[in-house]
Amino acid sequence: MWGGRMEQNALRVIIVDDEIHICQLLRKIIRWDSLNMKCIGVFDNSIKALDFIRNNQPEIVLTDIRMPQLSGLELIKKVRNLKITTEFIVISGYKEFEYAHQALQYGVRSYILKPVNEDELNSELEAIGKRIRISSNEVRRTQELQQEVDKSKRIIRDDLLKQILDGQVDEKNIESEISIHGDCYQVYDIKLDYMDYKKFDTKQDKITTEKVMEIIESRLKETVNEILMTVREDLHIYCLVNYNYGETREIPHLLNALLVELDDYLIGFEQYVVTIGAGREVESFSDIKYSVTGAYRAVCNRLRFGTERLISEAEIDVSDVKVVDRIMDRHRSTLIAFYNNYESGLLAADIEGMFQELLAEKKIDMTLCYKLMEQTVYLLLGPSEPNSEKYHYFINILHCAQHCHHIDDMVLLIKNALITYVDGLREAAEQRISKPVMEAQRYVDEHFREKIVLEKVADMVGLHPIYLSTVFKKEIGMNFSEYIVETRINEAKKLLVNTNETIFAIAEEVGYKDSKYFSQLFRKIVGVKPAIYRRLNS
């Protein structure tokens, strides 16, 4: 170590003189500790000193004015040409005073005549040190202030883009906030997907999205007039740019280069994949909403084209948006029936069939897959009370689906999620019904075509008939005889609609020998006669 014990912010000093003993003398008489400085180099060769200054940029250089190969004046000139802000103290004899005076044009304010006086040298170093530290503090305060200003501007600009995305700002109010002097606007949806949607890390998400936004701004800022960015749910990073016609051809190349840079950054995490969706180029501020929609549509079509690529809105097929409504109309009643009857396997098969119908269309915008997914999940799990378990399950499916980057993954997600939920409902329902009641209920379901006697069933399940009747009504919501009638009538309804059997035959099929009594009972419960019910539902 060249000096004594120093603080971490000690100023770094080098000494340059072609006479090494002069260098050693100067190093010895400088009061390093009290000045809070340290010597990081002594050179008797000015060319080597220049190379050291270039690589290390010390705060202070003490240099002789006359040296072979490269004079002190030439050394100062070359350092200034390198834009290095090192302070110089020039040491000269009376004969070289005019040379020292010339150094003033390079911003040198300190020179000392030989022979060097110890007090004078340390006093000059102290003055330079104060000047450097004051300047450094001012620069630091200016930088901190600028960082705060930039941070505030970024918050305002990000909020502005949120307002644009939500349709809450107009062209008249935006001109004072951003530069919109370019001819074109375009919106990009930079979508980060989890490689595994079951594994996520919100803390890492924040770090990653901030870095991705830095990369986007660094890559685009030299070409476009204005960049606005904001992060939306499910790691959609929206970017609005404003640029001139002259840059139109450059934009796709910039986006592809941006994609490569983002891939290089994300590959180290082994956690995310990225896709860029580019909306249409628009000329009017009021048309930005169309570019927003197009960017989202483009990103959704990674389900077809794959991730880690740029997808343009122009590549997307124009689909019949009503196809989803037609599919839902065909499947709504069966979906609800399978859900209510806890038939999870049939429910999953029906959902898979719906997506197969959608994908069988000649032209399909994959955005419709998200629409079908959302409507299906909403039909079965929504609406529900916010903060309820059902609501959170519903929201979680939607969020996970936004990270599925292949259609098979999305369908599998929905099927598995609903199977798990419906099976849970069934298990909970079964736990609410005691075993004897379940056995009595199962017996009726299997033997309703026969004559059923309460006493016989009670004996079978090991309960007194009166007690069985009581707990049956408490747990099922109706008494034992009512449950028998309801089971028979429900079966009769199916036979009336799905078969051509006579009313008499159907009555016998469900356990009634007297068809007239059956018809009267059916009308009492259903509200219409069996024949009329058949006509209304066939």
Image (cartoon, rainbow, N blue to C red):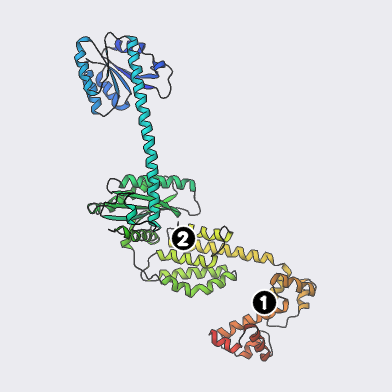
Characterize the local packing of mark 2: few (<14), some (14-19) or many (20 or more) Cα atoms within 10 angstroms: some
Q: Please state which of residues 508 and 372 is positioned toward the viewer in this rendering.
A: 372
Q: Are marks 1 and 2 in contact (CB under 8 Å)?
A: no
Q: Please state which of residues 110 and 312 is positioned toward the viewer in this rendering.
A: 110
Q: Is residue 179 above or below residue 516?
A: above
Where residue 301 appears, as percent x and y from the top left, is: 38, 61
What residue is disc 2 on?
409
Q: Residue at x 69, y 77 (%)?
A: 483
The amino acid on which the numbered mark 1 sits, given as a three-letter code, is: Asp
Q: Is residue 498 above or below residue 437?
A: below
Question: Mark 1 falls on what kind of element?
Answer: helix
Total of numbered circles in the picture?
2
Q: Is residue 365 above or below residue 122?
A: below
Q: Residue at x 32, y 11 (%)?
A: 120
Q: Residue at x 44, y 65 (%)?
A: 371
Question: Mark 2 falls on what kind of element?
Answer: helix
Q: Please identify the quarter of the rendering in which residue 236 is found.
A: bottom left
393 displayed left or right of 442: left
Q: Please identify the quarter of the rendering in which residue 492 is found.
A: bottom right
Where residue 53 appears, as percent x and y from the top left, is: 29, 24
Where residue 27 appears, as percent x and y from the top left, is: 34, 13
Where residue 51 appears, as percent x and y from the top left, is: 27, 24
Task: Let me know if residue 267 appears in the view.
Answer: no
Counting residues from the start of the chain, the first of labels 1 and 2 encountered is: 2
What residue is disc 1 on?
445
Q: Please identify the quarter of the rendering in which residue 289 is found.
A: bottom left
Task: Let me know if residue 55 appears in the view.
Answer: yes
Look at the image and tell me in which quarter the N terminus lies.
Answer: top left
The amino acid on which the numbered mark 2 sits, given as a three-letter code, is: Asp
Q: Residue at x 32, y 21 (%)?
A: 60
